[in-house]
Image (cartoon, rainbow, N blue to C red):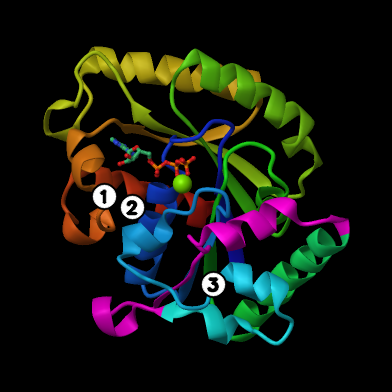
Amino acid sequence: MKIIAFHSYKGGTGKTHLSANLATVLAQKGFKTALLDLDFRGPNLQTLCGIDANITINDLLFDPDLTGEDILVSFESQYKIPLFAAFASTDFRKMGDIVRADKKQRQRSLKRILRLRDELSDSGFDYTIIDTSPGVQMESIDGLVISDATCLVLKADDFDISGTKSMVTQLYSLLDSINYVVLNRVVAETCPPEHGVWSKSDIELVNQFEKTITEEMRMRVLTSIPCFCEVAREGSRSVFSLDHPDHPFSHHIKELATRILEGF
Ligand SMILES: Nc1ncnc2c1ncn2[C@@H]1O[C@H](COP(=O)(O)OP(=O)(O)OP(=O)(O)O)[C@@H](O)[C@H]1O
Ligand SMILES: [Mg+2]
């Protein structure tokens, strides 16, 4: 099993959307895929998947008797693809428990995340996709530590870039994973691009930007996804590429999947 985490320095770059859409595309390719919400501070995946989960990853971190089977929700019958998800709790009390966890509990949490990884692997999962909190929260780092590949999601703005650069130097250099960059919500001169395709001058602009990122961060840019109004409008209510498989955003997700698979 391979694990891919989506992370970012700043919030709102598109981690949740990209992780849910990528997990869906991988499951559509026939891979048994688990989507894990490790964004305990601002969980969104329950809303995105239209789920009200009874037992969450938060419970698993605090209750030694719970296993992966207790928390995984199957989408197999709904979407006819081998997609499963485990969610972070939206209960403020449980969110607070995570934030206030002492060192001992943080160690227990990491052990239980590692045990969950082993359970998923033993249950025949091909891929696990992890959505994390932005910045350097402990729980996000747990997600990064167990990952084989990390996709650092950036919006192309200066705040995002300068913060991300320090995070890459100080944190990513310690990780034993393949680290990629995904540019998302990219605003070029023509926005949104006509029929989802950049114009020639915009391609040059985006290429130049990708080159700067590659040179400055020494990480490969897997894809640059434009800012699409339809995604901003509809994307938070459902997994966009399931409802709009032919939309250019969905093609970008398929391209992202191909490049990630090629990297292993
Ligand atoms: N390519 C895109 N084009 C337009 N809007 C997008 C795109 N990708 C994501 N969005 C929008 O950006 C917003 C933030 O996306 P999302 O919640 O996935 O980000 P996030 O990184 O998970 O945020 P947080 O750090 O708060 O968890 C959402 O409103 C979403 O619809
Ligand atoms: Mg999110």
- Residue 44 picture location, percent across and down: 42, 53
Boundaries of the magenta span? 74-103
User: Which residue occupies the foreground of this view, 113 or 126?
Assistant: 113
Residue that label 2 marks: 254
Give the residue type at disc 3.
Thr
Q: Secondary structure at mark 3?
A: loop
- Residue 135 picture location, percent across and down: 63, 36
Residues tagged 2 and 1 counted as in contact (Cβ below 8 A): yes
Q: Is residue 85 magenta?
A: yes
Q: Mark 1 packing: few (<14 Cα in 10 Å), some, or many (20+)?
A: many
Q: Secondary structure at mark 1?
A: helix
Of circles 2 and 3, the one toward us is 3
Q: CA distance from mark 2 to mark 3?
A: 29 Å
Q: Residue placed at 60% from the left, 65% from the top? A: 2
Residue that label 1 marks: 250
Give the residue type at disc 1.
Ser
Give the residue type at disc 2.
Lys
